Image (cartoon, helix red, strand yellow):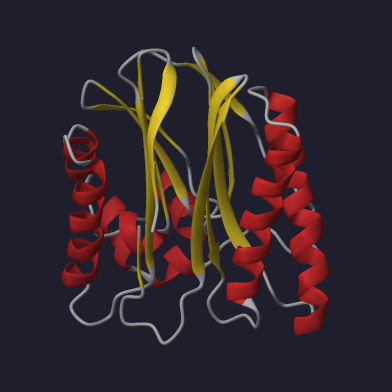
Amino acid sequence: MQRLGDRSAQEDLADFRVAVNPPGCLLVVADGLGGHHGGAEASSAAVAAICSTWDQRPAVDKATLRHCIEQAQETVAEVSKRYRNEARTTCVAAILGEGTSYWAHVGDSRLYGFRHGDTIHRTKDHSVARLMVEMGELSEEQAINGPEQGRLYKALGPDTELEFKVVEASLAPDDAFLLCTDGFWTRITEVEMAEALLAADLESALSDLAELAVYRSNGNSDNVTVCAARRKSGIALGANNN
């Protein structure tokens, strides 16, 4: 689910894949860094590389997700050569299986995990704002609205030491996951996310939230991108984009 917002170009991208054997679902979101040349190309390259790597050997395990992210890093670094080595992108990706989930992220695009409407997982941004919140120098609200939010110390791209952690967690029958860019999570509450993931029409609910994120930005909206999946009957269902 995407909205251009009040930007002149779309630098976000999301995609997903569903596999039957083994049963699993891949979701990925990327956000090209603003102020850098080639942001849209960087996010597109990252998403394409992750999906292509998964397509070649879909599997629900930590090594597969790590390989996907590493391939994305190599691809973005190569693309960046056409943009004076400035193109960079955030990235968050998740693989959901029958009873286990894995995710990893770089930058400030986020993953949220919900169970029965409660938040049980949320990634921590690789941003100056997040560091300042943890040190008690900023409140959560100040971090969202302040200039430090856009200052990242990790991203996919050239001249960076790629360090990321793949998280593993059990997956219950009613768990749901939402991946999004900062244009979405800075304007939408976790309660609203949880309610959308419980809606009968998930696509419509996500579309409404994307519109709401733009509206709440009062004419200064970033690109808005969100995708989600909820698990029922032992397999990942309901991955949504577009």
Relative image position of residue 44 (x, y in whole percent):
61, 65
Q: Is residue 119 left or right of residue 137?
A: left
- The answer to whether 125 is drawn above or below residue 54 in the figure is below
Q: Residue 55, located in which quarter of the rendered image?
A: top right
Q: Is residue 71 left or right of residue 235?
A: right
Q: Nearer the viewer, residue 233 or 165?
A: 233
Relative image position of residue 75 (x, y in whole percent):
78, 60
Q: Nearer the viewer, residue 54 or 103?
A: 54
Residue 188 showing in the rendered view: yes
Residue at horizontal 68%, vertical 63%? 45
Q: Quadrant of the C terminus?
A: bottom left
Q: Nearer the viewer, residue 228 or 113?
A: 228
Residue at horizontal 52%, vertical 57%? 127
* Residue sticking out furthest to the front: 20
Residue 137 showing in the rendered view: no
Residue at horizontal 72%, vertical 77%? 86
Relative image position of residue 177 (x, y in whole percent):
38, 34
Residue at horizontal 67%, vertical 48%? 50
Q: Quadrant of the N terminus?
A: bottom left
- The answer to whether 21 is drawn above or below residue 238 in the figure is above
Q: Is residue 222 left or right of residue 141?
A: right
Relative image position of residue 109 (x, y in whole percent):
48, 53
- The answer to whether 228 is drawn above or below residue 153 in the figure is above
